[in-house]
Image (spheres, grey):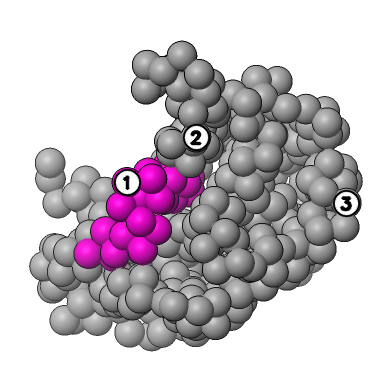
Amino acid sequence: MNRDRTYFLFLNIGHFMDHLFTLIFATVAALVLYREWGIGYAALLIYATPGFFAFGLFSLPAGWIADKWSRDGMMTVFFIGIGLTAIATSFSQTPLQIGIGLFVTGMFAAIYHPVGLAIVTMKWKNTGMRIAMNGVWGNLGVASAALLTGYMIDHGGWRMAFVVPGIFSIVMGFAYMALRWHSIRAGEDEPKAGAGAAPAASANYRALLIRVSAIVFLTTAVSSIIFQSTTFALPKIFDERLQGLAANLAAWLDGVGSAGQGDVATVIGSLAFVVFAVASIAQLIVGSMLDRHGPRTVFMTVAVIQIIFFTAMPGLTDGIALAVAFGFMLGAFGQIPINDFMIGKTASGAYRARIYGVRYVVSFTVLAVSLPLIAFVYQNWGFDTLFRILAGTAVIILAAVAVLPKQLPTPETMPESAPAAAE
């Protein structure tokens, strides 16, 4: 494997670790802490909220520092810092302590998206597929959080779910630093091949760019509600809706004639992992379609998929619920690379990390606000109402995306003579 492939692999591992660390607590809270600490699931979600606020809030300064100093240097800080923080969080004895640990974890987790994605979109061509491949690794991190934590609950205790990936991340941090030491020491980052100074933007370009930017940030905010609700709540949804299926699978795996509860947490975590992992394939399909067809048609298709499956989910249990969950997770994961693709195509390279930082401030602030929403809806009406709300948010996305231009505005494709509303 050459250095270029190794570089991309490290960036993908970083995305994997970023989402794994931010969702370990989701499975811990859903499957064990509500019993061990005697606190309801809805109440526990409150302690995760500050961490997601940090996840968003610190994205902007992370992008700014990366642009001013070194993106590779910031990635090294990410790997080592989030690993140390995860290990520290494992020693928590109270909800307040784990809330503080999750907040600091969110501070380091905020580094990845504005910095890692800026590197991916500036260094390599075929932006849609690169972002999609990187996104699949992130989704596998989401999936592995449920799988790893479920396994640790049954076989080692929930604290090890923080410690083991923490140690791995620290090792990756030092390996990344060794690979990119020259860039870090020089404080320079490599631009994408063929990248040059952007021509002066025309008035028509600026007008269309404002229109696209408004749609990007609106859909970013709304789609973040869907992403957070599905990824954070899915272990709890499965814990409630798939108990019969999980118990039967646990009994079958143990070779016992009657359903036992010994490894049900492992089975539920494994089912969540399978759903997340298979749904990640949607990003590769979407990435390929983005490079060929542009974002509007792709985004509208993904929104329709979400509407159909969220509307179908209320009241379902066991096998049918699992099948429908595959459907809405395909839509939830499929939408992830689209806004990043649009930013990568339209943003100036010199400011790209900062623009990604703004995008993720919006995204992860909404993720944080979504946690109290999930808790409130769950406590008062249950998950069926949440699914109906998510179907409504997908309708909003569909309406917003319908007014996207067919061609994204760039200085190269929008000369002064082009009509501002060309579609």
Principal secondary structure, stretch drawn in magenta: helix
Mark 3 vs mark 2: in front: 2
Question: What amino acid does circle 1 point to?
Answer: His
Based on the displayed image, in which of its 4 quarters is residue 416 positioned? bottom right
Question: What amino acid does circle 2 point to?
Answer: Gln
N-terminal-most mark, 3 or 2 = 2
Instruction: Residue at 67% x, 24% y: name it.
Output: 318
Q: Is residue 121 left or right of residue 414?
A: left
Marking on residue 261: 2
Mark 1 vs mark 3: in front: 1
Q: Quadrant of the C terminus?
A: top right
Marking on residue 290: none
Q: Position of residue 77 (x, y in %)?
A: 29, 77
N-terminal-most mark, 1 or 3 = 1
Rendered view: 264 above or below 62? above
Q: What crowding class fits label 3: few (fewer than 14 Cα within 10 Å), some (14-19), or many (20 or more)? A: few
Viewer can see residue 295: no
N-terminal-most mark, 1 or 2 = 1
Judging from the image, what secondary structure is the residue with disc 1 in?
helix
Question: What amino acid does circle 3 point to?
Answer: Trp
Q: Position of residue 121 (x, y in %)?
A: 43, 56
Judging from the image, what secondary structure is the residue with disc 3 in?
loop
Q: Which residue is mark 1?
A: 155
Viewer can see residue 381: yes
Judging from the image, what secondary structure is the residue with disc 2 in?
loop
Residues shaded magenta = 138-167
Q: Which residue is mark 3?
A: 381
